Image (cartoon, coloured by chain):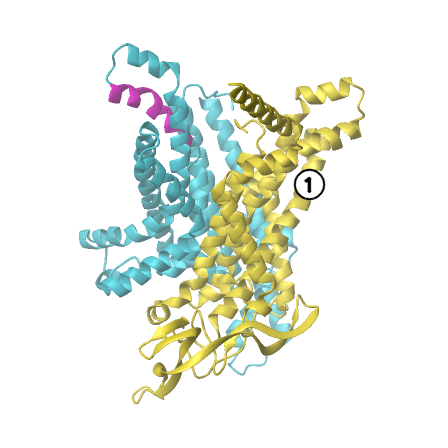
Chain colours: A yellow, B cyan
Amino acid sequence: MAQDAATQINTEQTVSEKDLRYYTASQWQLVWWRFRRHKLAMLGAVVLLIMAILGAFAHFFAPYSVTARNGEYIMGAPQIPKFWDANGVSLRPFVHGITTKRDPVTLRKIATADPDTRRYVHFFVEGEPYKLLGLIPMNIHLFGLDEGKLHLFGTDELGRDLFSRTLFATATSLSIGVLGVLVAFVLALIIGGVAGYFGGPIDYVIQRLTEIVRVIPVIPLYMGLAAAFPKEWSNIQVYFAMTMIFGLIGWPTLARRTRSHLLGQRGEDYVLAAELSGASASRVITKHLLPSFTSYIIVDLVISFPYMILSETALSFIGLGLRPPSVSWGIMLQDAQNIRAIEQAPWFFIPAGFVVLAVLAFTILGDGLRDAADPYSVSSH
Amino acid sequence: MLRFLVHRFIGLAVTMFFVSIMVFVIMELPPGDYADRYAFRKFSGTGVNVTEGDIENIRIQFGLDKPAWQRYFQWVGGIVTRFDFGQSFAFETSVNNVIGKRLWMTLAILYSTLVLTYLLAIPIAIYAAIHRRSAVDYSLTVLSYLGLALPNFLLALILLYISVTLFGTSIGGLFSPEYEKAGWSVGKALDLLQHLIVPAIVLAWSATALQLQTVRATMLDELNKLSVTAARARGIPEWKLLLKYPARLAVNPVVSTIGFDVNRIFSELPIVALVLGLPELGELLIQSYLDLDMYVAGAVLLMLTFFIVVMNFISDIALAALDPRISLEG
């Protein structure tokens, strides 16, 4: 009896401790707790993190460089490392060796797997030298074969390794998204701020102008601007010009939302309370208003990512965006544009899987963040 | 009502004026001008030596020596008064000739896509909202995620791949070979309808995903209204009251976003058309951008935007007619 009472008191204490923790938690802790419960969104975040790491350290994870060609294995099918075959089991994964014959009629090289030879997969092998993150000179790659080359995703029409190219493409496509969103964000803050601060006619003109820009279908508009890039521009120039375009056209949505968040919050009671307590304007803005909508801004940024990525893919796909030898998801999908190619080599579709995965992950992550960041959502702790 | 119409119409005209300026800017953006490209195109490979003077002559011939604002008014003036969109140098004929039939094909694709979107989205979303947390409702959520994540042109590629590998036929194009050059007949119209199904499915893909969400959300809001409870209390059959109150209102957001849907469809159309090989304006737009045939590109961009603005106009009017709560003061 006495023991029961003791446990009861104990549970009450733990509950109130839990409550205490909840009521004293900072805003970001609350957001994090709410976000953590959203399993799908967590999965989205993990997927994106993995993609970002694969992209950032593409030189290490990719066995070969973007342009390295394997003349022995052109339009070759994906090779999947295995642990056993008809000749027995091996603890070290291996693929079968390739023998190349010429087709007697078309004289095209045909690569076939030879089931009697084994090429073993080794890890941390030495390969082509590179600079990790553009700084540290290295020549270690995550994996490679003891002899010949391993093509996890197969090869393209020039015999280039699609796995390596996909990783480098991931870096390009994701970074264009990041830079585009950043440009849009800075423009949105400046122009949205100007519109909000001056109000009146300037606000009106900016609002009307953005409405007119938004009437023009967006991809045709991007294409029109991209068509104006001079042919002699280097790949780096095209890359930055594209981020600028995405930013320039992407900002109105962000600016509008920032502005409406600000206008909406300005009339809230807590702002009035702070003002009545004698808080200065700068304190109200930095201590009360800004924290109230930074979470929204982050959500908006995450949500606008997929559009940037899809736009880049679309533009590069039709040949108005990045140009080879740059490599992005859109450029890789160019190979899948003609039906004859994808009939013979369905693995050209693999980069499409990355596009879909990235967009899906960003969308789900955005949804999860929005739920977590919304202070009015019902939350049982 | 008349005042409302006039007001909206003025809005349409003002928007088109600013859009035409933006389109003109895009036409002027590529380096070099029409005369350079014309001379390069016409004389490259012929061995004729083109001098600066020749290019200058071409420039004067086309009126390119005038300042930009004069050329803008000349261009817009031609369109407004004579419906003349200028010259295409890649096709060496007038832009009107190049666009010709493609305009009608574009509209055929647009309307079949819109019809398919609404035929799918409205009934399914209403059903899902009434049967909340059912299998249909959950699969709808998954589908709408995929609708955004799987870009239309990839869907088109996948459908192409499936049709070629499984059925051995290509689904591209708008006409079967035997009707390609034939005059219009019932057979040709049916053939066109058949070929419109795939582009319509591909383009309706993401539009449907978005509309499903909107209609479902509105429907859920409306289902909890007192009018529904009151109707139920009066003993009106369930299907009748659902149609009469919430379903009727759930259609309003669809009507008000027709312009957005057209915008989205036109945004995705060029790439889908390229993949599926559809002879319409979007594909022409890509081609003219690649050739820097800017009069064609400008005309197409202007036309696409014009349809969007007109659809916005129509949706405003339709909404005002459908929903008496909308103020006509506008």
Res. A313 visible in picture: yes
Stretch in magenta: B238-253
Q: Secondary structure at mark 1?
A: helix
Question: Circle 1 sits on which residue?
Answer: A189
Q: Looking at this rendering, what residue extends furthest in the bottom direction? A: A104
x then y, percent, for residue A315: 51, 59
Q: Amino acid at mark 1?
A: Leu
Badge 1: residue crowd in 10 Å (few <14, some 14–19, many ≥20): some
Identify the main secondary structure in magenta: helix
Q: Name the side, left or right, on which B226 lies relative to A250.
A: left
Q: Quadrant of the N terminus of chain B?
A: top left
Q: Name the side, left or right, on which A172 lies relative to B137.
A: right
Quarter where residue A271 is shown:
top right
**Residue shown at the point (62%, 31%) measured from the top left:** A260
Residue in front for this viewpoint, A195 or B147: B147
For residue B266, above or below residue B162: above
For residue B151, above or below residue B169: above
Residue B246 lies in the magenta-colored region: yes
Res. A207 visible in picture: no
**Residue shown at the point (37%, 47%) measured from the top left:** B205
